[in-house]
Each structure stands twice: as C-alpha cells, then as structure tokens.
Image: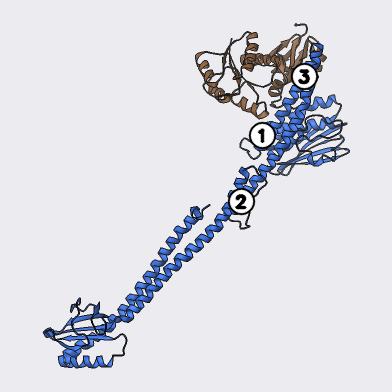
Amino acid sequence: MKALCLEDDTVIADHIIGLLQSSGWQVTASRSLAAATRAITNEDFDLLVLDRILPDGDSLGFLRQLRQNNVQTPAIILTALGRTEDKIDGYDSGADDYLPKPFEAAEFNARIKALLRRAAYGEQKDMLKIGLLELRTKARTVFHGENFIDLSPKEFELLHYFMARENDIITRDMLLKDVWGLSFDPGTNVIDVNIGRLRKRIQQGGDSVQLITVRGIGFKLEEKGSD
Amino acid sequence: MNIFRTSFARLTLVYMAAITMVGTGILYWSYDAFLEQSRDNINHLVDTDMAGLVSRYYDSGDMELVRHISSALELTSLENPRQVYLFLSPEGKKLAGNLQSWPKGILPDASLKLLTVSTAPEPQSIFAKATLLSDGYRILVGRDAGAYHTLQHRLFNNLLIGFGLFLITGLGIGLLTARAFLRRINGLNRLCQDVENGDFSVRAPLWKRRDEIDILGRGLNGMLDRISALLTLHKQTADNIAHEIRSPLMRLNAIIEQGEKKKDITADSADLARRQIEDSVTLLDKLLDISRIEATEKDRSSFTDINFSRLLENIAELYVPLAEEKSLDFSVITEDNIHISGLEQNLSRLCANLIDNALKFARTKVDLTLKKNGDKFILSIRDDGPGIDPHIQDRIFERFTKGNNEHQTGTGLGLALVKAIADQHKMTIDIAGASTGTTLTLTPYSL
C-alpha cells in the first residue's frame, strides 16, 4: 500500500511518515505541490495525506484538479485551518476527510482506517451482524437474538454507522459529520450523551456486543471478548 | 499642490478658452454685420445720387450736369457724410467736382470702392463708384468714409474689450472655483496622509453640500468608522485571547511538572492535558469563525434555501438525550415548512448554541418554539435558569462576556457567535432576562 504525504514542515512530516510506516504503509514524501504533482504522475497511490497550506499554494486546488481528472484516491487533509468553513471548503474540493492540527496519533490512524473502509464499502449490505446484534437496513429493525430493540430513527442511523464499521474507532468529528451532517463541534458532551443512550438501548437487548469509549479519540463497537 | 496641476484647473482653462473663442466669434460676427449694414447705407445714397446725375446728363446735357454738381457741392458742404463728385470730359479734363484728379484704383464699372484720395489739407478716405457716360464722359460719385471709420474703430474697440472681459472673468472664476475645489480635495488628501501615518481618529471635513466631494468624504468617514470599530474590537479580542489562552497553558504546564516529579504521566493526566490543548484550539477556532462570519456578513452569494423547521428539529434531537440526562423537561414545538435563505452549517450552529446555552442554565425546563409570523417567523427559547447578570446584560453578545454565577463555564464566545450568525442572516435577537429565567427571541427582519 502506497501513500503520498504532502507536508512542508519536516518535523510534522516525519511524524506523519512514522505513523503511516508503523501501519505498514510505503510512504513517498513531497514538500511542495510541484513535487507532489510529479510524484502522482509517476506512481499510483492508495492514499493521499495533504497539508493544506504549502509554499507554492493551497493543496485544495491541487486536489480539485485531481478529482477533475478522475483520480479518486482517498485523500485526507491535515491542516492548521480547522474552522467550520475551512472544513466545508475542504470537503467541497473533494477531500474525504479533514483533520485539524494538532491531532492525536490514534485519531489519525482511526481516520485513515475509516477512510479506506469507506472507499471500499461501495455496496451496502442489507443485514449487518455483530455477535447476536442484527440490523436490517431495509426493514429498519434491530434484534439482539430474540429481543427487539426499539430505536428512534436517529439512533438507528447511529447504530448502523457503527455496525458498518465494526471494530473501527469512530471519532466524534466523524459522527457529527456523517450522522448529524454537522461540520462544527457543538460543544458540551452532547455526542457522548447520545452514545450513552444508544449503549443503554443495546444493553437492553443483550450484552454480546459493547459500544466502548476510546479515551481521547472516540468510540468503537465490538463483540464482547473480541480482544 | 500647485493649482495649475489640478485637473479641475486644467478643465477650467480649456472650458474658458472655448467660451472665449465662441464669444469672440459672436462679437466679430456682429461687428462685421454692423459694418456691412453701414456700407450698404452708403451704397444706397451713392446709387440714388448717381441715378439723379446720370438722368440729368441725358436729359439736359453736360453743361447742365456741371452746373448741377457745382450747386450741389455748395449746398451740401455741411452735410455728413460729405459728398464727393468728379465729372471728366472725354479727354480727361475736369469739368466739375471737388476732386482734383481721377483717383487710382477705381474703374467706371459702377461698383462701390473704398479709396483714399489726396485732398487738402489731408488725404481723405471715401466710398465711391464711377460710371462711363456716352461720348466718353466719366462721372464719379462718392461719400466721405470718416464716419464709417469712426464706427469701425468703436466696434473694434468693443470687440477687444469683450474678448478681454471673457478672458479675465473666465480665468478669474475658473481659478477661484479651482482653488475652492483644490482646498476640499486637499482636505481629503490630508485625511489620507493622517490615516497613512496611523491616526484613525481623523475624519474628512464635510461642507453640507451633498455634492460628489461630500459624498466621497462621507464614504471615507463611513469606512474609517468601520475600520476604527474593527481595530478596537481586534485589540480587545487580542487582549482577551492572550488572557484566555494563558489558563489552559498554565494547567498544561502544571500537569507536565507533576508528571516530571512523579517520573510518570497517568492516563488521566494525559487526558486532562489533551483537554487543555483541545480547549485552546476550540477557543481559537471559535474566534476565527466569529471573525470570518462578521467579515463576510454582507456576502450572501452562497446562501441556499433551507427548511429551517427541519434543521431546528434535527439539532434539537441531538440535545434530547442531554436534556434527559439532566432531568430537564425539553419541549420542542415547531411549525412545519418554515424556510429561510442562509448557510446551513451556520444556522445549525446558531440553533445548537442556543439550545446548549439554555440546557446549561435551566433548572427544570427549556421551551423551544418556532412559529410563523406573517411571511417571517419567530424563534424563541426559554429556560428557567438564574437569568442574566444585570451587569453584563448589554454586553452579553460581545466576545468573552461571562457572568459571575457558578453555572458560567465555557469560552464566553457562544452568544457572540450566535449574534454574528444572526446578523449574517438579518435576524434581530431580543433577550429578556429575569430572575425566573432567560428568553431569547430571534426574528428575521427581511427574508
């Protein structure tokens, strides 16, 4: 698996390259848009990790150009511009994810993993199953073994999101963006409270799966005793 | 600035030259018409005289004509303009008249000529015409041109005076207005220079004339007002940021020091440290968001039609579990299909902040209602919390305004953000705070 890392700050670049390499990536590093353009014309990549502001321009333009040329390689933007409107600009330009600096190593890994999953999903399965927990997308029903679990439409959507990403760490930002369609942090612990409620609902059906909190990053749905 | 280098002075000079040329042209035209009229009059007199003399010659012969000319000259010596006659025999001998010899430059072709003839005591200017009679006799009839010349002189003098007056008044008025104009422009130039030197308190002088310079001045003043307000705001914000960012950094420092002492950082303290960093970043992001929204307040180019009812319900739904956790009665009543033109993320953020705030302060309940009001709507959110500290009531929407009560946590930016988004979407916010709670009402003033 090959990744292109476009970052002009050497300290941060080394950090990112280290993270990617420890997850088994083969990394090509570029420090400018020009170098990245050269690299991308010579090689095929499976992942693009792009810093936003570079000495020779904004990488959003570069990404937009790639998307216009039908290059669909998953791309994540890492940037100091972390405002709501910057994020919207990023997604509009064809970024698959947008991670503001400073970020945690674990969060970075979780995002990359989710990104690649998302790229691979393509078709949707009708029945998702983890442990005894079964979710049917068309019928919109959830059972734990024999027990029917009554969920509100939003809770169903939330659980579906987790079940489609079994064992992945899901960050708060991902939930906000993908489930609620929000690109800002509403503050307080509103996401945690929603997750808490979903957790209770699942537990009402049974305990073969658990929705755990991953400290400082997000949440994960897994089969009990899976690790 | 040199007055002659101003475009207004140059324009005035060009205008003045054009007016002087046209004016002088008109004067010259009337001068010429006057002189022509005067020549016509003389021509008419000479013609009548000539016709009389010619018919007398053919009726009564040359001797009778000689006699007639002599008596006419004696009779009319006082007449003005004085008559001039010369009657010559076929051999060129003078038979009668007051000229000594046939003047040069006149032929007997009956056309009027202006001539100078030598008479005593000084040469005389005359209008004359001559004709040939039968048997070679020639006769010349004329009138003294002295009066004509006097008229010509006077008219020419008038022409010169007119030209001079045009030139002087044009130049004078032009330079005076150019100077007045320049003085006003210089006022604006001085203003620009002062601003360039860093003084933002200066304002353009206004003349209450509502002309283009006053409009320009008013425009500049409006700009300066806005810039000064922004500068003050930026300064306050910068001071506040410096102050606010210190606290998480201090806490972070404390955590690191503790970790150093114990030669270990526990997961809990790492979490705490991480939260300090997150808080600082959130603070900065929020500030940047507010500034960006304020800066683009008038740009509505990316607005889209939004079902505000649905948007509000979606956000409210996000907060229902939070309200339940806090055992608060959270009632949401929205009328369907209320639309607004705006930015979805910003409006969501506005709603989220309002609800978040109300839930934070409420003791037992929060009521959120959205209802139609003509072609607009009223959004109101009420909590039964402690109300707003009267000390901060009028600063409640400014950045970093926080109350003193124990519930007050957070950045103090929430309501500033709400206000910025409300302004962007042309909504007014009314706030009613009492000891029994706070009610916030948002109404768009134009949809």
Q: Dot 2 lies on which element?
A: helix
Look at the numbered discs 3 and 1 and tell me whether their residues touch, using CB distance below 8 Å: no
Q: Nearer the viewer, residue B138 or A93?
A: B138
How far apart are the alpha carbons under marks 3 and 1? 29 Å
- Can residue A29 be seen at all in this image of the molecule? yes
Q: Mark 2 points at which residue?
A: B217
Question: The numbered mark 3 sits on a residue in which chain?
Answer: B
The kind of secondary structure element at disc 1 is: helix
Decide: is B193 above or below B15.
above
- Label 2 or label 3, whichever comes before in sequence order: 2
Q: Which of marks 1 and 2 is nearer the N terminus?
A: 2
- Image quadrant occupied by the C terminus of chain B: top right
Q: Which residue occupies 44% across, 58% down? A: B14
Q: How is the image coloured?
A: by chain
Q: The blue chain is which one?
A: B
Quickly name the residue at label 1.
B292
- Nearest the viewer among B43 and A219 is B43
- Position of residue B303 measured from the top left corner of the image (x, y, whole percent): 64, 36
Chain for colour brown: A
Which disc number belongs to residue B273?
Answer: 3
Q: B147 and A31: which one is in front?
A: B147
Amino acid at pointer 3: Ala
Q: Mark 1 lies on which chain?
A: B
Q: Which of marks 1 and 2 is in front?
A: 2
Residue at 86% across, 29% down: B328
Alpha carbons under labels 1 and 2: distance apart: 28 Å
Name the quadrant containing residue A6: top right
Q: Earlier in the sequence, mark 3 or mark 1?
A: 3
Q: In this view, does A171 lie above or below B329?
A: above
Amino acid beneath label 2: Gly
